[in-house]
Image: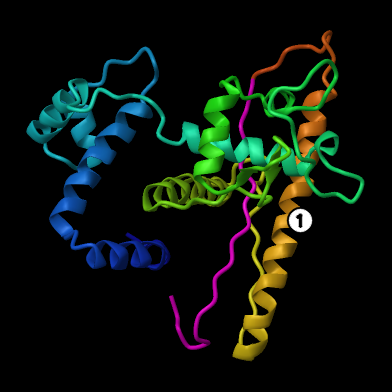
Amino acid sequence: MDADLDRMLRRVLRPLIAMLMRRGIGYIALRDLLKNIYVEEALRQQPAEASPTDSSISLVTGINRREVKRLREEAAHPADQDIRDPMSGVNMAARVVATWASAAAFRAPDGAPRPLEIHGEGGTLDFDALLRAAKVDVRARTVIGELERAGVVERREDGRLHLLRTSFTPETPREKMLFLAANVSDHLRAALHNLDGNSPVFIERALFHNGLDAAQQAALRPVLAELADKMLRQANETLLGAGQSEGPEATPSPKRRLRLGVYYYDAEAGDAP
């Protein structure tokens, strides 16, 4: 392993290893997980029509053939048969909130999210219309229950739903872990895509300031959070508009997904990662 790659891996892995140690998860548990991931990735990178042997997987992963055979057999008969995406409910709720806060049709003249009827009559703008705009094919009652549980929506005396926050942020430890997995994974994939010299180049930029006064930094933190929220809402409005501009005669093309993120971190000036 060359020196630059060694430095990169140490920097990327250090906060993860520190978290695992805080949770009492030692090297052996991580080693076993890494074996599984190495085999899974080696299989994923094979052509769809290929039938890789245990020996070929062993060659590219460095894991002995007998261990590869065992891991492949375990993967073929997983103990947990639940194949549902654990992020699906969280993504659904986040998409509904983002549409409510970003789409012009659901904002009042002052820019604030409009209160919505649960089920309107005729041309009334209601929660069902919001679900259609967000492309969420789930019953309104189910989504409303999730948003109320998260404290994002409130049903008031007028019978309408009021949006309390313009973003759906994770509340439970499990939801926070799911968000971390999705966001950090895509961020890392974007950076590695660029590192490999692939095209198009993905956005991978950050601001860095050193030597800021601690009191100034504390005062700036909510300002930066507001700027980030505004940028993401504007981006979401642009993306929603692009989706609605496609007419019925538009030429179908393959579907893609994207994730645009903003992150923030601060620490003591001498606290090197």
* Residue 62 placement (x, y as % from top left): 19, 42
The residue that mark 1 highlights is 230
Quarter of the image with the N terminus is: bottom left
Taking the spot 83% from the left edge, 23% from the top edge, the residue there is 124
Magenta highlight on residue 262 = yes
- Note whether residue 60 is visible: no
- Classify mark 1: helix, strand or loop: helix
Quarter of the image with the C terminus is: bottom left
Taking the spot 34% from the left edge, 67% from the top edge, the residue there is 14
Name the colouring of the figure: rainbow
Q: Is 258 on the left-hand or right-hand side of 20?
A: right
Q: Nearer the viewer, residue 43 or 241?
A: 241
* Residue 11 placement (x, y as % from top left): 40, 67
Taking the spot 56% from the left edge, 31% from the top edge, the residue there is 143
Start-end of magenta stretch? 255-273
Q: Is residue 262 above or below residue 174?
A: below
Q: Give the main secondary structure, helix, strand or loop, of the magenta stretch.
A: loop
Outermost front residue:
157
